[in-house]
Amino acid sequence: MFVLHIALQGCLRGEDVAYGLTADTGGHIRYLLDLVEACAQDTEIARIVIATRLFGSAFGDAYAVPEEPVSSKVTIVRLASASPGYLPKEALHAEVESLSDALVAWILAQPTRPDVIHAHYADAAVVAANVEDRLGIPFVFTAHSLGRVKARALGCPATDTPALDHRIAAEETGLARAALVIASSRDEAEVQYATYAAYDAGRIRVLPPGSDLARFQSARTCARVDATLDRFLREPGKPALLALARPVARKNLAALVTAYGESPELQARANLILVAGTRENLDDLDGGMAETMRELLVLIDRYDLYGRVAYPKTHRPEDVPAIYAYARTRGGVFVNPALNEPFGLTLLEASAAGLPLVATDSGGPNDIVETCGNGLLVDPRAPTEIARACLRILDEPGLRERFVAGGARAAAAYDWDRHAARYHALLRALSVAEPPLSNPRQLLICDIDNTLVGCEAGLKAFSQWRSEQEGLAFGVATGRSFHSAMAILEQQASPRPQVMITSVGSEIYHLDPNGVSYTADRTWRDVVSRGWDRARVHAALAEVAGLVPQGPLEQRTHKLSYFGDVATARQVQARLDTDGLAATIIHSHGRYLDVLPPAASKGTAVDRVRALYGLAEADVFVAGDSGNDVEMLRARRQAIIVANFSDDLASHAALAHSYVARATHARGVIEGVAHFRKSPAHAI
């Protein structure tokens, strides 16, 4: 397979990247270089090319070299555009046509054409769409960060900012045209992209970036780095609050300085370390970085923080592990106060180096902290909240130890080899489409957690069994969102479902003819919208004692999710009855409580799919393990309860007709289907 990446912005080269040299020379370049390095290890990948802009500049001659070999499989190709010099991303839209022409000409001159193009950032997506129009090569899109999110974070409507207007239009093109969109986090996939007119949830996949964390896990202090930071500080041995980010407005470093400056208690407990890019001369910084640095210096002066804040002018890329180690050896905390952080690579690095986190609650840190349990999330616009979280970690040794232990899990959770394996599986599936069954004879719907997955050997057996079932459509029904469900299925190498019933039955997605992307069932959305007054239900439940909302990503248009015990579930039902509000209440595992529209449940969603396929009741099998499967199991004659069930499912009065398997997890599903197929009442 030949994969062509397009990455137009920043100063991109194969090694010794000067991160922070310009406002656009940041994490997306690190992401791309790490990605292609991991991808090159796949023996089925023959060639990888990164196409970027060629320009002459004061930054060096490397960016005017037309072709730069990176490895035996990877090459950077630089294409000339209409303008000869370096351009910030805000000006790249004017180069799109000339870059499209140059890239088409380059492709036509190659012995073989790329199988797929991967566009990085907005203008690259427009170039990729132009190439697809002329050569028919499909493309995938990674936005890295989004114009609408930036506009909202900075409080500037895009229509008032021409550069953002161009960027957002290009992002709309990417979302509308890409065969697949690669997101780094659920927040990006489910919240950020959802603000776009071209948003299509079923064409987005969440593939968290990997990270080469070994050098951070073994991070050691360095006398030179220590001296560089210590020279700013009166008491260099105090704990260090460390921030490492480019000095751009979106990174919100000013809020951290404000939080520190307005908290005498925090100043007494810790020093503040701001590693904000690299600069020789403040006036030479571009893209608003000079203005941001001046703002930081003004704040340091306003709060008279001299001797308590370090802000070195330069650092080398190889110094970063030692900077983390500096903070770790002093019992410090890593702080990311960004207004929005699409992913948060530095969070993983800092965690691997042994630092607990205080991070923005906007973007990828939600996923990282949930996965690793390595820190606290805060509102980046609330300096007092930032200060409070830092103090809590500094003052609670047990909490700090727990977060440090959680950070040790980062290397396993965010691995480039796993990312590359999933990524390549998607690219191959796009090139060799396996369309869904058009006229299935039977339908099997399984819950995911602790039913389909939870036993690796059982899932392997299920995958083999599934491949032998002609005419059987396979689907899942889960409390997870679409993107959360798809991520775990792909991570576990599950067979790809033909239908996905998600968010406890309130959403349905159908596999597209390309065998990879999905389309939301809008008819079902209309059905479950009837009689659902989400705002009133939410307001009523806010007054129920003991009812604790789950995280923001678990709240959906047609689902409100909480933590609560059985008694709390009864209070919820009573409150809704008192207010005359219709809803379906699902309680499972003794603590999860979902409130859905009256028409929504896994059971009603399965019936929608059964009717859509024109199948009789005897042609449908369902399998589950917990309380949120009750509605689905109750409604189907051929219901399977796997042996590792919870919530006393096997003794539930409404499920007496179910088959309770002797085998656990996916093997129990196979056993249950075989049981019902042998039944005299079953129509084969």
Image: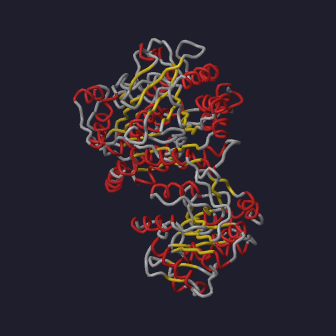
Q: Is residue 381 above or below residue 438?
A: above
Q: Nearer the viewer, residue 251 or 423?
A: 423
Identity of the residue drawn at 26% across and 30% down: 226
Q: Does 553 sit left or right of 318 as displayed?
A: right
Q: Is residue 595 above or below residue 313?
A: below
Identity of the residue drawn at 52% across and 21% down: 53
Instruction: Name the colouring of the figure.
Output: secondary structure
Is residue 649 visible from the viewing direction of this image?
A: yes
Q: Is residue 194 above or below residue 272?
A: below
Q: Nearer the viewer, residue 475 or 90?
A: 475
Q: Is residue 334 above or below residue 673?
A: above
* Residue ranking furthest to the left: 223
Estimate the x, y position of residue 638 in percent, counting from the top left: 60, 80
Estimate the x, y position of residue 671 in percent, counting from the top left: 48, 78
Identity of the residue drawn at 43% across and 68% down: 461
Estimate the x, y position of residue 62 in percent, counting from the top left: 41, 16
